[in-house]
DNA sequence: TCCTTTACGTTGTAATTACAACAGAATCGT
DNA sequence: ACGATTCTGTTGTAATTACAACGTAAAGGA
């Protein structure tokens, strides 16, 4: 577990907490570690969760398959990101989504009760962690609002433009790499893959962008 | 301000906090009150926010108008609900949406710094409030995920069914009242009003539901 | 290297939607 | 009670999408 201390130190959850203090907190917070091979489920829809999770290594997708097999990808989780927080409240309902490893991944589990219940003075950074948790879930909240913004667009082209523009803003570059292949991007934007692929071709013909695999270059007027 | 103590006591933010303790906390948290007439803006996109807000009276919509005037309604805020939390982090960016009063409304403002910074022992319920805040934003998070679920459906009929079914589950009844008129519901589901109206008619013809104004009855097989 | 699998783009068609325009009903203010 | 305004449903058309089927390219495994 200690192998990942450097990673944990750089996560949002432990921002401002020193190396040694993290070691103390790992036991204080009841931390566990689990590894998942690519393609394996980390969490399943319908499960109940009493932990907050942090991705230490790899990459995950939050997704949901409906009764007819239609897949909807809600988001991508990168190294250092927190997930599961929304289901950690004591009487929170079951998970609404699956979380699946898209690469071999390592995940930390923290008992939520211990995280949100400030403990004895031994754990002086506990308050900071609770605040970090609040900020992290706020950021997640805004990510969802941004996704709703993409999804509210009527045409595939508008959805693509709003998504790619936001990524360019986040990555602070006109050349961006996205964490999705074509099918995954279509599942993320809730459009048909082939129609989206066709629309991307038209957008390239119109001089709006260039792309190769999951690398896109946005072209300004 | 004291007129609203009963209302505040029933909100999620102050769950588990006694009447007298709320009075103490109102000053501890730097509370302010503002009233808004129907149609007025409570918050505007682009503003920066350093408060957490609680609706004491009335009803609000979280919405966003794009450059071309297309309106998208992200959610409805009822009495006792918290909003603005996601933008309250110290270096959070500007608001992504407007919040507008759809009825004459009364709103409490709490300075976020004082809320998340646990103060002296004088304020013994402060920790409970921070936890309540965490649970509230978790719930908001799940609301957004549910909305994404409606929005990910390909057809208007599927969007309507998923939304109305979820409302029936929430309201625990097959007869439900929704906080939107037709145009607002269309803006919420990101579909065309007239097409939605037409689809609702077909669904009634197909025996799926009955409706009158904003009252819907779902008919099971 | 060969074979298998996955990923990507293209095309045609049927289905669905957005948009505009309009009419009747309901609501509001005076 | 009256007119003005808002809300709702209806219809037709143009635009857009979903879906299915297919070919090729790239990636992965034996």
Image (cartoon, coloured by chain):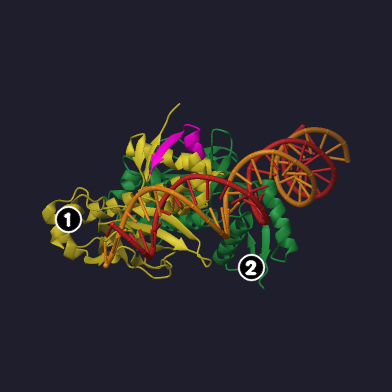
Chain colours: A green, B yellow, C orange, D red
Query: Could one spot residue B60 in this view of the protein?
Result: yes
Mark 2 — residue? Answer: A174
Compared to residue A186, the image places residue C2 above or below, namely: above
Chain ID, mark 1: B
- Outermost residue, top side: B221
Which of these two is toward me, B95 or A80? B95
Residue A184, image x, y percentages: 62, 47
Provide the chain ID for the residue under circle 2: A
Q: Residues within 10 Å of mark 2 (few under 14, many from 20)?
A: some
Residue at 28% over, 48% down: A117
Question: Is residue A201 toward the left or the right of residue D10 in the image?
Answer: right
Which quarter shows the N terminus of chain B? Answer: bottom left
Q: Is residue C17 left or right of residue B144?
A: right
Q: CA distance from mark 2 to mark 1?
A: 50 Å
Under tag 2, what secondary structure?
A: loop
Magenta segment includes B210: yes
Q: Quadrant of residue B164?
A: top left
The residue shown at (31%, 46%) is A114
Tell me the quadrant of the picture where the C terminus of chain B can be found. top left
Front in this rendered view, residue A23 or D30 = D30
Residue segment shown in magenta: B202-212
- Residue A82, numbered label: none
From the viewer's perspective, is A116 left or right of A179?
left
Q: Position of residue B13 (x, y in %)?
A: 25, 53
Mark 1, residue position = B124
- The residue depicted at 73 percent of the width and 64 percent of the height is A206
């Amino acid at each position: 577990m200690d192998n990942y201390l450097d990673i944990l130190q750089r996560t949002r959850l432990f921002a401002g907490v020193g190396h040694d203090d993290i070691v103390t907190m790992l036991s204080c917070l009841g931390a566990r570690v689990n590894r998942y091979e690519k393609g394996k489920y980390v969490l399943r829809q319908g499960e109940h969760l009493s932990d907050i999770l942090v991705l230490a290594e790899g990459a995950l997708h939050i997704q949901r398959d409906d009764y007819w097999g239609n897949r909807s990808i809600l988001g991508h989780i990168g190294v250092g990101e927190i997930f599961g927080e929304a289901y950690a409240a004591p009487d929170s309902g079951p998970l609404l989504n699956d979380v699946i490893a898209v690469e071999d991944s390592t995940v930390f589990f923290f008992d939520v009760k211990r995280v949100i219940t400030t403990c004895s003075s031994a754990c002086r950074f506990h308050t900071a962690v609770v605040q970090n948790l609040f900020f992290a879930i706020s950021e997640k909240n805004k990510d969802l609002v941004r996704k709703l913004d993409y999804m509210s667009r009527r045409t595939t082209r508008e959805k693509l433009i709003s998504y790619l523009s936001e990524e360019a803003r986040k990555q602070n570059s006109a050349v961006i790499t996205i964490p999705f292949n074509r099918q995954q991007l279509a599942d993320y934007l809730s459009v048909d893959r082939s129609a989206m692929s066709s629309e991307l071709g038209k957008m390239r013909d119109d001089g709006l962008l260039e792309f190769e695999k999951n690398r896109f270059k946005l072209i300004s007027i």
